[in-house]
Image (cartoon, rainbow, N blue to C red):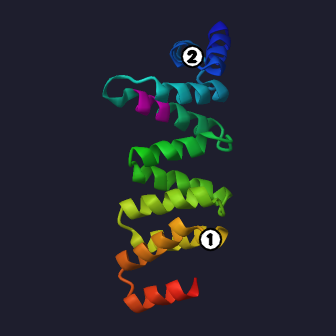
Amino acid sequence: QQFRVAGMEAFEAGDDQLAVKNLQNYLISHRDDTEALYRYAIVRERVPLKRNQHVSRAMGALQRVVELDPDHPSARLKLLKLYERYRLATEALKLTEEVLKKRPDDAEVLRMRTWALMVVMRHEDALKTVRQALEQQPRDLKNRFLELELMRSAGHSDRQIAETVRQN
């Protein structure tokens, strides 16, 4: 318990090195404490290890949080952002599918799913997904341009693309 308290205090104080050390020691025997796992993941990512092991350990901790508490307020989004940053599209697709079952209108998750679908060359699916995001945020220019790019990638004609531009 002393490691948990010291780790949480170090986390709050911004002492990442000390937080990692103490939370890591605590988690050896308390693998189901989602708040300690989440905070460990946050600081673990920020304290580098050789061969990017800090990233895989942070992802592992976040995956465990999501496994234990599927509705954790921040863990899924943080994990998705890591998947996106390190180009793990297959993992991102699986997780976005799970999130969208519960929150089908989550624009940020839809954006991440669009990215992952593009990476795995599923352009028609990516186009459908970006259009879902545009239903939520119709003035999002980034997604609007992405829609046009995906139309081209999916083989839509110039006429179809021009019509989409006119409609929006």
Q: Residue at x 37, y 60 (%)?
A: 119
The residue carrying mark 1 is 139
Residue at the spot of label 2: 15
Span shown in magenta:
54-59
Task: Give SS at disc 1.
Answer: loop
Residue 71 visible here: yes
Q: Nearer the viewer, residue 164 or 73?
A: 164
Visible residue check, residue 129: no
Q: Position of 137 compared to 141: left or right?
A: right
In the displayed orientation, state which residue is furthest to the top: 2
Residue shown at the point (67%, 58%) measured from the top left: 103
Query: Nearer the N terminus, badge 1 or badge 2?
Result: 2
Rendering coords of residue 37 (x, y %): 59, 27
Q: Is residue 42 magenta?
A: no
Q: Main secondary structure of the magenta part?
A: helix
Measured in 3D between alpha carbons, the distance from the residue under mark 1 to the one under mark 2, in whole angstroms, is 41 Å
Q: Is residue 82 above or below residue 9?
A: below
